[in-house]
Amino acid sequence: MTTAESAPEPSRAGGFDLGALLAERGAERYELHTRHLNHQLPRMLHTIGFDKVYERAEGAHFWDADGNDHLDMLAGFGVMGLGRHHPVVRKALHDVLDASLADLTRFDCPPLPGLLAEKLLTHSPHLDRVFFGNSGTEAVETALKFARCATGRPRVLYCAHAFHGLTTGSLSVNGESGFRDGFAPLLPDTAVPLGDVDALERELAKGDVAALIVEPIQGKGVHAAPPGYLSAAQELLHRHKALLIADEVQTGLGRTGDFYAYQYEEGVEPDLVCVAKALSGGYVPVGATLGKDWIFRKVYSSMDRVLVHSASFGGNAQAMAAGLAVLAVMENEQIVANVRATGELLRSRLAALVDTYELLAEVRGRGLMIGIEFGRPRSLKLRGRWAMLQAARKGLFAQMVVVPLLRKHRILTQVSGDHLEVIKLIPPLIIGEREVDRFVDAFTAVMDDAHDGGLVWEFGRTLVKQAVADR
């Protein structure tokens, strides 16, 4: 019988050589996506000039095939909270692979999920238990199911313009029609305006509401819940025997200058909290739903229901090791404190430009989640150009700013949502003053060009033609 000690050394992964495969076929990346994946992605990247080839990355930077350094102000939509390839997370993953653990047997209680749950719960001591899944949308799905089960009610309220994921349940509480169109029928959930306590109370009075799910700061447009809204909503929900769900998939783990964004408002203690993205360390997909003990006991009410909600890869050793390493880095490197300081520096320097540029309407956000909104200019010359873009498609000016930031200044950013004139900055949480200087200098140069009628507007004509062609 072959034992672990006497097992033969494996061949080179059965003859598989990843490096050789990438060297041989890596140049086909855009053709492969066009043929076999979402064909609109390479089309979009070619159109706006984002069709680059990136070869390596570290921290808040990555390098293209020509060796040019790029600053990452997008963090993989928030996944790369600690930047790319943090050495502590890398080591943890090497260690867990080298340990050859008996993972996912499904009929044991491995230590790593318990240890990660314990560590996560220290940051929200009013919560008691954790369910581990594989993504943010799965964390939301879990919260929706648990809220319905715990309350015995069918309907969940969500805020207009919210984004909670794209699977069918989470899509039912997605406040953007562009994502929902074509996928009906969805669950019987209902939108209320963010910050409108009266609208919330009217819906709760109907007696069929299980919960309100809310992003403390919405990713689409970077709109924060008004001061006092979360605590008022919590009081109303509990009075009506309904639950508060905080979606912290993007805002959690230090992004806004607190460990969770809901902690900005004193006294707010959600019944369920969804996290994901940065918990992965940028390596292994993971999602977590934290909740109160009584809610979990309602769901898992007997041994017959022990697997009533589960995930095939939930709690896998690699994801748990990555999560534990991320939390250790956050504590040891004082990540939240860095976010507060660097975020305030970046926001204040950008806000100081509002009086300088008439196309710049507002700078808002908290920590390293910042929205830069553009608006209708005062001068006649710029107003005509602005009107041309708005007539073709709202959101084109923001795209006109994003493109030269990448092409000319090698800084990756994103427009905050469809038909929005808002750029969202969600860089890795490890950036500092050097990266702030680089971004502000580049942004100032792009805004100077836009106000002088330079090359930015030439690209705008290309976007207008494309927008008209897509109608």
Image: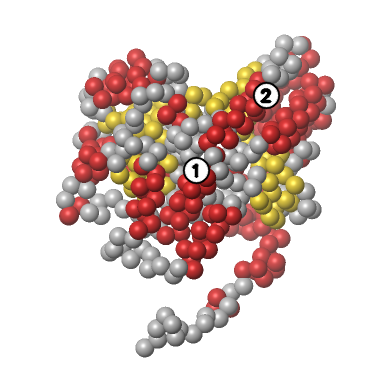
- Residue at (34% x, 30% y) in the render: 269
Of the numbered discs 2 and 1, the one sitting upstream in the chain is: 1
Q: Quadrant of residue 451?
A: top right
- The CA span between labels 2 and 1 is 29 Å
> What residue is shown with label 1?
331
Residue 429: where, in percent of width, then height? 58, 39
Looking at the picture, tell me which residue is in the foreground, 428 or 392. 428
Q: Quadrant of residue 431?
A: top right
Task: Report whether residue 436 is seen.
Answer: yes
Q: Is residue 61 above or below residue 260?
A: below
Residue 11: where, in percent of width, then height? 55, 81
Residue 341: where, in percent of width, then height? 60, 30
Q: Is residue 408 above or below residue 41?
A: above
Q: Which of labels 2 and 1 is toward the front?
A: 1
- Residue at (46% x, 35% y) in the render: 259
Residue 350's label in the rendered image is 2
* Secondary structure category for the residue under label 1: helix
Q: Amino acid at mark 1?
A: Glu
